[in-house]
Image (tube, rainbow, N blue to C red):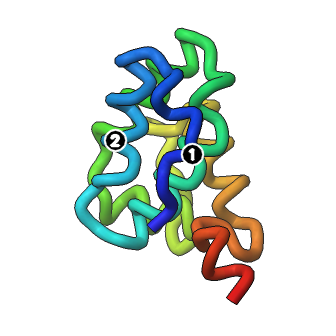
Amino acid sequence: MTEPDDNATELSPRRRRLMYRAHHRGTKETDLMVGGFVAKHIASFSEAELDELEAVLELLDVDLADWLSGRRPIPAEVATPMLARMAEECSRPGAGVPEAARRA
């Protein structure tokens, strides 16, 4: 699983809570995709982006995994800039694969 980076202790309580939620989704596939994305960007998100991230984290794992992997299109009723950004990044080869596993 992608672990939060060493700067996690320097994050605000809200950002640390979101980081935890992103890495503890319930399914390993979603933990890796969502957690990896959040770990990479959490420190730079604006307050509005954090609000969007919170909304994404309320979505079901099975749906997120399908949308982020491209198995199903993101429905218009849940499409947000944050979810589109996550899907675009997760569609890249190696997305969600922990750094240590890439070196192996």
Q: Secondary structure at mark 2?
A: helix
Q: Nearer the viewer, residue 38 or 65?
A: 38
The residue labelled by disc 2 is 20
Residue 102, compared with residue 28, is above or below; it is below
Residue, far bottom:
104
Residue 74 numbered mark, or none: none
* CA neighbours of label 2 inside 10 A, class few (<14), some (14 to 19), many (20+): some
Apparent side of residue 103 relative to residue 51 in the rendered image (left or right): right
Q: Which image quadrant for residue 19?
A: top left
Q: Distance from label 1 to label 2 (Cα)?
A: 12 Å
Residue 91, compared with residue 7, is above or below; it is below
Determine the residue positioned at 62% across, 54% down.
87
Residue 6 image point, x, y percent: 56, 42
Residue, far left:
26
Determine the residue positioned at 71% across, 54% down.
89
Q: Which image quadrant for residue 20?
A: top left
Name the image quarter holding the N terminus: bottom left
Determine the residue positioned at 63% across, 31% down.
81
Name the image quarter holding the C terminus: bottom right
Q: Nearer the viewer, residue 1 or 92?
A: 1
Residue 79 image point, x, y percent: 53, 38
* CA neighbours of label 1 inside 10 A, class few (<14), some (14 to 19), many (20+): few
N-term mark: 1 or 2: 1
The residue labelled by disc 1 is 5
Q: Amino acid at mark 2?
A: Tyr
